[in-house]
């Protein structure tokens, strides 16, 4: 896997990271990568469990309180004021076909944030919304066999998430892993991948 120094995971809500790419985030952290989760729509009751879940996976959360009715230009300006985007070398965010409006909003914001610098961009397979995707091409498989238990532990920090969802994401990781010969994998659609 390409070595990243600093990764921004731009999600709509608390629990999106854990359900979609928690194993990959833990793998990055285990390899010494700094991971920041910018939660764009954090004004939800389950934000109270972010600290507990982030401690399991090792990422740093930043919580904003926006929704899709906020002007994109204002949100981008606020994020760029808070974060020095040039220090990140990967953005992971939601896919454009997601049927949750806040997730589509994150997709739009992430694509605007990358306009000023070269940066890799991956789109995550966001459970449970991924089942409606029509053009999500899985072209990055991350082996999370050693991180899957941490992913489940982090999901279970959120008391709002149905307990069976942790099991369903594990089944998905096993199916994805079977395609590449590993026990568990998370999948992404790469948009931009830079090599220098």
Image (tube, grey):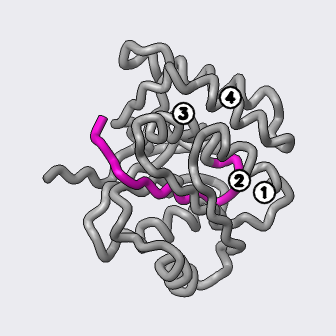
| Mark found first going from the N terminus, 2 or 1 | 2
Q: Is residue 152 left or right of residue 107?
A: right
Q: Secondary structure at mark 3?
A: helix
Q: Position of residue 76 (x, y in %)?
A: 50, 79
Residue at mark 3? 23
Q: Residue at x 39, y 40 (%)?
A: 137
Residue at mark 1? 47
Q: Position of residue 12 (x, y in %)?
A: 64, 60
Alpha carbon of mark 3 to alpha carbon of mark 4: how far?
Answer: 9 Å
Task: Report whether residue 16 is seen.
Answer: yes
Check whether the beta carbons of the residues at disc 3 and disc 2 lie within 8 A of each other: no
Of the numbered discs in the image, which one, if any, rests on residue 152? 4
Q: Secondary structure at mark 1?
A: helix
Check whether the beta carbons of the residues at disc 2 and disc 1 lie within 8 A of each other: yes
| Mark found first going from the N terminus, 3 or 4 | 3
User: Who is closer to the viewer here, 77 or 68?
Assistant: 77
Q: Is residue 152 left or right of residue 120?
A: right
Q: Residue at x 57, y 56 (%)?
A: 37
Residue at mark 2? 14
Task: Report whether residue 132 is seen.
Answer: no
């Amino acid at each position: 896997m390409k070595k990243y120094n600093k990764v921004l995971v731009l999600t709509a809500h608390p629990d999106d990271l854990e359900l979609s790419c928690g194993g990959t985030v833990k793998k990055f952290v285990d390899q010494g990568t700094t991971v920041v989760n910018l939660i764009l729509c954090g004004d939800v009751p389950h934000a109270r469990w972010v600290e507990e879940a982030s401690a399991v996976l090792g990422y740093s959360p930043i919580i904003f309180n926006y929704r899709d009715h906020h002007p994109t230009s204002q949100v981008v300006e606020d994020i760029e004021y808070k974060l020095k985007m040039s220090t990140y070398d990967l953005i992971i965010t939601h896919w454009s076909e997601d049927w949750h409006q806040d997730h589509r909003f994150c997709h739009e914001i992430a694509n605007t944030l990358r306009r000023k610098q070269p940066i890799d961009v991956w789109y995550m397979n966001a459970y449970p919304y991924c089942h409606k995707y029509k053009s999500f091409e899985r072209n990055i498989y991350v082996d999370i066999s050693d991180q899957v238990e941490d992913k489940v532990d982090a999901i279970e920090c959120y008391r709002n998430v149905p307990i069976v969802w942790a099991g369903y994401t594990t089944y998905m990781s096993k199916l994805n892993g079977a395609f590449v010969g590993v026990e568990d994998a998370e999948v992404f659609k790469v948009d931009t991948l830079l090599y220098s």
